[in-house]
Every structure is written in structure tokens, then in C-alpha cells.
């Protein structure tokens, strides 16, 4: 059996949600809890994700079995209607991290990317709260909930993977398998904003990270996040943050000096 980057064990009712969790360059395999019994031993992955829903006992049992057969592979444990007691049990059973449901799809993707990077870096250390000390790829200034239809989630995933390149509405509509009109209407209904405003927010948010942490000039940052015209970038940045990119960069560097 070919190696899968991430193996997800979840009830089939949740598979539609996870089908939207595409990560560029990674192979994601999905299995039901019933399939886990016959496939667990032969599976080879860099990360296991267990979504037990409200079946906490079943989820903890699978977590223990997974750690027995794949002791060196991190496990991300998700549960609905959980509690602090359940989180403690999950960590004691070997979970690398615990997430209560519903979960933000973009946060989940960021956590998975971080755990994969950590696993592959050969510097993995035992700490259930490791995620807090990891550098998130891009903090998102909005929440994407699990009640969004899978086709819209696919479009969001596409945007998140490609926002630094040219993104257009017809391409997004094709990803969502909708006409342009229906895609724009449905996207705004579930996210509260137009698709292109969503793209702009991601670009500006990524620009804030680069301005604060990287030694890049304004033009380089503008091009890196997908703006071909730096004057347009500066105008959009100021409109959304209240500061010009230069003023923002100066303020963040001043904060670092005073710490």
C-alpha cells in the first residue's frame, strides 16, 4: 500500500468535510472506523487524524490502538461535545493535539501542515501543546465553520493554496462545480463576503506576516502575496488595516526593539 501523508479515521458522514481538506503535495487517505480494524496495521503515514464525533469511547480505543501500532506517528484527535476530562484522556492515550468540534477548516489545515513539518524535521518533542509554539503558516482574520457546503470549502481551499498567484472568479466557480452567478451568491451566503474580498483578506493578512517577520521591501511583499501593482497593494492594505505597509512594518519592528 502506498504511503499516505495523512490518514483520517472518521464516520462516513464526515468524509464530505474532509474531502475539502486538500493540501498541496500531500496524499490524504480517509477510512471509516470499521475500516480501521482491518487496515490499521498496514497503513503508513506521517500523521493520523481521528475524528470520533460524539463516540468518545470508540475514539479513545482507536487512539490507543493507533499508538500501539504506530508509536512514532503523531495523532490529532477531534471530538464533538467533549470536555477537559476527555482532552486529558486523549493526551494520556498519546494524542499529539486535541481539537473540540466544530473546527475551523483553515485552522485545521494549518495545524496539520505544522504537525507534518514537525514530524519530518526529526526534532519532534513530546508536548501536547506544541502547536502553540509553532509558527502558523498564516493566521486567518475570519472563521470558516464546518456547516459550509463541501463545494464551497473546496473553493476556499483552492484560494488558500493559490492566493499568491492570479485567482479569478471563473476558475473558482469551476472548482466549486457551479455557474459563476450561483457560486458568487452561495460563497457570500456562507462566508459573508465576496470571493475576491476573501482573496484580498488572505493576501493582506499574509502581507502583515511578511512585513513583520521578513526582511523584504514593500514591492517584494506586494508581489509575493499576489499583487502585480504595488500602489494597489498599498491602497488595499491601508483600507483594511488603517496603516500603510511602511507604517505597519515600522510599528512591528519598533515593538520588537522595545520587548
Image (cartoon, grey):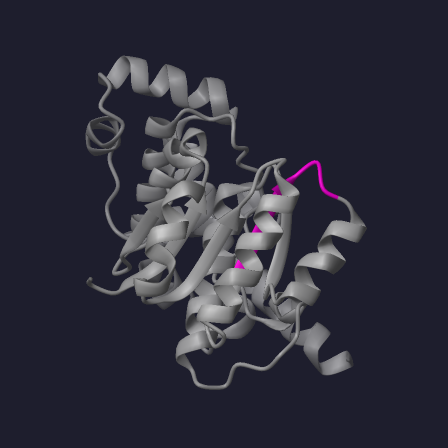
Q: Position of residue 32 (x, y in %)?
A: 40, 41
Q: Residue at x 42, y 72 (%)?
A: 117
Task: Note whether residue 15 is visible.
Answer: yes
Vertical order, 51 against 148 (above or below): below
Q: Which quarter of the rendering shows the N terminus?
A: bottom left
Residue 34 found in image quarter:
top left
Magenta-drawn stretch contains 79: yes
Q: Nearer the viewer, residue 13 or 101?
A: 13
Residue 250 found in image quarter:
bottom right
Vertical order, 79 against 252 (above or below): above
Q: Position of residue 52 (x, y in %)?
A: 56, 42
Q: Residue at x 63, y 35 (%)?
A: 54
Q: Nearer the viewer, residue 67 or 209?
A: 67
Vertical order, 194 against 88 (above or below): above
- Chief secondary structure of the magenta portion: strand
In this picture, which residue range is highlighted in magenta?
76-82
Amino acid at each position: 500500500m502506498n504511503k499516505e501523508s495523512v490518514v483520517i479515521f472518521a464516520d462516513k458522514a464526515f468524509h464530505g468535510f474532509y474531502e475539502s481538506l486538500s493540501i498541496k503535495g500531500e496524499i490524504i487517505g480517509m477510512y471509516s472506523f470499521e475500516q480501521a480494524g482491518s487496515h490499521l496495521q498496514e497503513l503508513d503515514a506521517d500523521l493520523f487524524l481521528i475524528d470520533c464525533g460524539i463516540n468518545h469511547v470508540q475514539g479513545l480505543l482507536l487512539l490507543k490502538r493507533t499508538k500501539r501500532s504506530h508509536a512514532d506517528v503523531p495523532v490529532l484527535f477531534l471530538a464533538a461535545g467533549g470536555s477537559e476530562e476527555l482532552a486529558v484522556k486523549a493526551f494520556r492515550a498519546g494524542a499529539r493535539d486535541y481539537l473540540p468540534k466544530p473546527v475551523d477548516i483553515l485552522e485545521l489545515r494549518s495545524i496539520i501542515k505544522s504537525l507534518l513539518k514537525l514530524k519530518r524535521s526529526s526534532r519532534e518533542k513530546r508536548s501536547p501543546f506544541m502547536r502553540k509554539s509553532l509558527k502558523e503558516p498564516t493566521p486567518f482574520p475570519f472563521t470558516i465553520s464546518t456547516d459550509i457546503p463541501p463545494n464551497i470549502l473546496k473553493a476556499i481551499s483552492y484560494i488558500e493554496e493559490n492566493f499568491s498567484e492570479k485567482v479569478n472568479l471563473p476558475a473558482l466557480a469551476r472548482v466549486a462545480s457551479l455557474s459563476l452567478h450561483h457560486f458568487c451568491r452561495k460563497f457570500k451566503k456562507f462566508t459573508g463576503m465576496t470571493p475576491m474580498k476573501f482573496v484580498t483578506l488572505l493576501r493582506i493578512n499574509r502581507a502583515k506576516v511578511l512585513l513583520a517577520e521578513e526582511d523584504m521591501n514593500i514591492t517584494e511583499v506586494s508581489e509575493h502575496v499576489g499583487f502585480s501593482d504595488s500602489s494597489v497593494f498599498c491602497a488595499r492594505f491601508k483600507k483594511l488595516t488603517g496603516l500603510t505597509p511602511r507604517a505597519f512594518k515600522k510599528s512591528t519592528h519598533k515593538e520588537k526593539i522595545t520587548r
